[in-house]
Image (cartoon, rainbow, N blue to C red):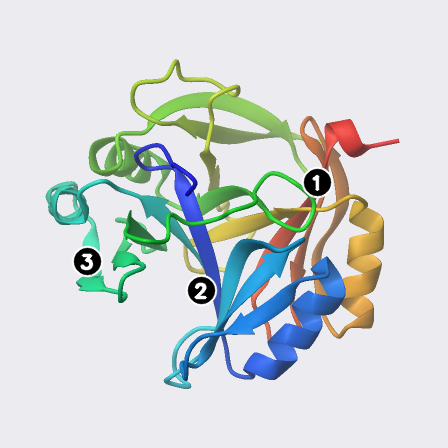
Amino acid sequence: MAVFAQSAPCWVDVQLSDLEAGKRFYGGLFGWTFRAGDGMPFADAYSDGELVAALAAKQDGRMPTTWGVYFSTDDIRATVALVRKAGGQVITDPVRAGAAGVLAQAADPGGAVFGLWQAGERAGFEKRNAPGSFCWTEVHTRRPERVDAFYEEALGFRGTDIELPGSAGTPEPFRVWSPAGTEPGEDTAVGGRAVITDAFPEMLPSYFLTYFAVADCDRAVETATRLGGRITASPLDSPYGRTAVLQDDQGAAFAVLQPTELLP
């Protein structure tokens, strides 16, 4: 079973109105295969036979159509207590997911929702940082100072501030997070924080963006649009590779990244 460092991203899932349509979209985009839960309205997704994510049918139509990320914890009740102490909101108190583990959901002070996962029989991803699997997550927020302090206290992250090239050619502030006990920096980073600027509509809420690695960013964008998805941010070269932001055919946002080592 995979072992995840404390507070490292360990799982992602997406809430969809149409589970079968979701299987067609992500199966066509990433080549995922699926295994349904025992009588449950969800399906585990596999890439090359290894577990990478889950698709779930929304139980309430008012729920957002969105990808969610979960951070690993050895003691979920202690982490939930830290979330409250640091000024976050606990949406779902710890609940057991059968023998797989224990989960909880929370929101940071800016309103971005994330999950916590204490492993039982399931640690999380079996494949990551390779084409067809999770490779990165970042929170987009309007309250960077407050949110930075929250994740440092609640999850033990240590931040490093960098600048990334923006779509308009101007540098954009960005912070990468490293787990406690590591030397903070880009080499140990497990996630990041971006700033939602005034260029975006005020009604845009804070959110986590999940990235999946792909062998060819431009081809992935073409495939996603052919399958009914939409382009939110066109392919762009970054220090880490070529990336694009997409929506699936039901409106769930995610990003794809062709890592630098896979560029021609």
Q: Are marks 3 and 1 in contact (CB under 8 Å)?
A: no
Q: Distance of mark 1 from mark 2, alpha carbons?
A: 21 Å
Pointer 3 local density, CA inside 10 Å: few below 14, some 14–19, many at least 20: some
Front tag of 3 and 1: 3
Q: Distance of mark 3 from mark 1, alpha carbons?
A: 35 Å
**Residue 90: which numbered mark, if any?**
3
Q: Identify which residue is drawn at 53% across, 51% down.
A: 210
Is 52 left or right of 226, judged from the image as shown? left
Pointer 2 local density, CA inside 10 Å: few below 14, some 14–19, many at least 20: few
Is 91 left or right of 238, judged from the image as shown? left
- Which is more N-terminal, label 1 or label 3? 3
Residue receiving disc 1: 167
Q: Amino acid at mark 3?
A: Val
Q: Amino acid at mark 1?
A: Ser
Relative to the observer, which residue lies in front, 161 or 120? 120
Q: Distance of mark 3 from mark 2, alpha carbons?
A: 22 Å
The percent coordinates of residue 7 (x first, y second) are 32, 37
Secondary structure found at label 3: strand
- Which is more N-terminal, label 2 or label 3? 3
Image height of 180 relative to 109, above or below: above
User: Which quarter of the rendering shows the C terminus?
Assistant: top right
